[in-house]
Image (cartoon, helix red, strand yellow):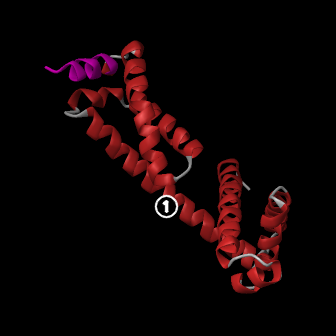
Amino acid sequence: MSLEHIELQRIATGDMDAFKNLFFQYQPRLVSFLTGLTHDKETSRDMSQDIFLMLWRDREKLVSVKSFSAYLFQMARYVSYDYFDKLAVSEKYADELLANPNLSETEEEKLFVEELQALINHTVEQMSPQRKLVYRMSREEGLTNDQIALKLGVSKRTVENHLTAALAILRKVIYAFLLAHISGGI
């Protein structure tokens, strides 16, 4: 019986010290692996915490694990798939809300859309002046990247970089907002 298997058996019986050892051994690699998938270190840390929490809750299953590393990284893949599925749904919902804010029919929905729009406006206000300007010219004025680049005297690539960064920030903020409303009820 391998040392790893003995540790897994100890964890399965509730040995917190064995679990802590496993956590400190694998957590940095797990965060690095997840960051490679999500490109977001904070989200990856949260996902890592969730995975280890799942491992602790279902620790009895660990006695049948042949390779903990393979088991752990397979869990990480599934958690990241779930993350991207939720993100895609949230982004689609947010895109629909932003594209058509007048679709709201109830007062609660109207309030929700107003809160979301206020959050987006606040987030945009916190951006650097150049990024804020590029975002507004694109989204509010409807200018193309080429038109923005020409008006600002910068390269099209600079405009694209600003828009990509602005949209990434907004996606995270919208995703957090939607999760808070979904978990807390609208």
Q: Quadrant of the N terminus?
A: top left
Query: Residue at image x 81%, y 59%?
Result: 128
Answer whether residue 35 is magenta in the image.
Answer: no
Q: Is residue 4 left or right of residue 49?
A: left
- Disc 1 residue type? Asp
Q: Is residue 80 left or right of residue 106?
A: left
Q: Where is residue 176 drawn, in percent x and y?
A: 67, 52
Q: Is residue 167 left or right of residue 138?
A: left
Viewer-proximal residue, 140 or 159?
159
Q: Is residue 128 above or below residue 110?
A: above
- Judging from the image, what secondary structure is the residue with disc 1 in? helix
Q: How many marks?
A: 1
Q: Is residue 139 left or right of residue 93?
A: right
Query: Residue at image x 71%, y 55%?
Result: 173
Q: Where is residue 79 drawn, in percent x and y?
A: 43, 48
Viewer-proximal residue, 112 or 72?
72
Q: Kindly indicate the quadrant of the structure image that contains residue 122.
A: bottom right
Q: Where is residue 81 drawn, in percent x and y?
A: 43, 56
Q: Which residues make up the magenta segment? A: 1-11
How crowded pointer 1 is (Cα within 10 Å; few <14, some 14-19, many 20+) is rated as few
Q: Kindly indicate the quadrant of the structure image that contains residue 143.
A: bottom right
Query: Residue at image x 67%, y 62%?
Result: 165
Viewer-proximal residue, 156 or 53?
156
Give the residue number, with chain letter if any, for mark 1: 85
Q: Where is residue 7 drawn, in percent x and y?
A: 28, 18
Answer whether residue 10 is magenta in the image.
Answer: yes
